[in-house]
Amino acid sequence: MRPRKLLHSLPVALANLHERIEHWRSSRAKRGRMPPDLWSEAGRLARQHGVHPVAKALRLNYEALKARGEGSKKKRRAPPAFVELEPLPSFPSPGSTVEVQSPGGAKMTIRLAGGATVDIVALIESFWSRER
């Protein structure tokens, strides 16, 4: 166990967790996994004070603590939008088709006759704004 004077230089929550982990280490009958409540507290402190200082102070595996410390930091993001465009032919075609589908399942198909000019972007923006 660490000398008492070194524990005083740690934040109170980290020193308390250090004591709890050391008690668990000394009282267990055989080697095994650390209880989830101790890991979650260590992960919370790692997010607050940094993975390396916490891993060193608590004598924990850096990589395991990093995985737990960064796990809840990750934000859920909307799936990236995907647009598939077919290559344009090098010769004039009789027409083109544009299909758009919203995440909610609504579909829009635009069929253009050869040489027709339409503001497709404005049509798609109108379609998306209707879905919101």
Image (cartoon, grey):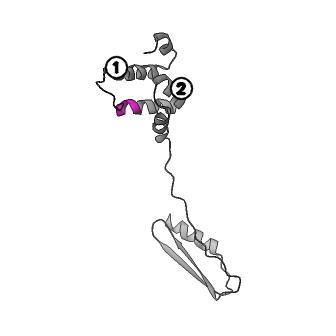
Q: Which residue is mark 1?
A: 26
* Residue 21 horizontal/vertical position (percent): 38, 23
Helix, strand or loop at disc 1? helix
What residue range appears in magenta?
A: 30-39
Q: Is residue 56 left or right of residue 27?
A: right
> Gap between marks 1 and 2, in whole Å?
22 Å
Q: Nearer the viewer, residue 17 or 2?
A: 2
Circle nearer the N terminus (1, 2) = 1
Residue most extreme to the bottom:
94
- Is 17 above or below relative to 81? above
Q: Which residue is mark 2?
A: 53
Q: Position of residue 6 (x, y in %)?
A: 50, 14
Q: Nearer the viewer, mark 1 or mark 2?
A: 1
Is residue 37 on the magenta stretch?
Answer: yes
Which corner quadrant of the image does residue 90 belong to? Answer: bottom right
72 in magenta: no
Residue density around tag 2, few if under 14, some if 14–19, many if 20 or more, within 10 Å: some
Disc 1 residue type (three-letter): Ser
Kind of residue sitting beneath label 2: Pro
Q: Is residue 50 visible?
A: no
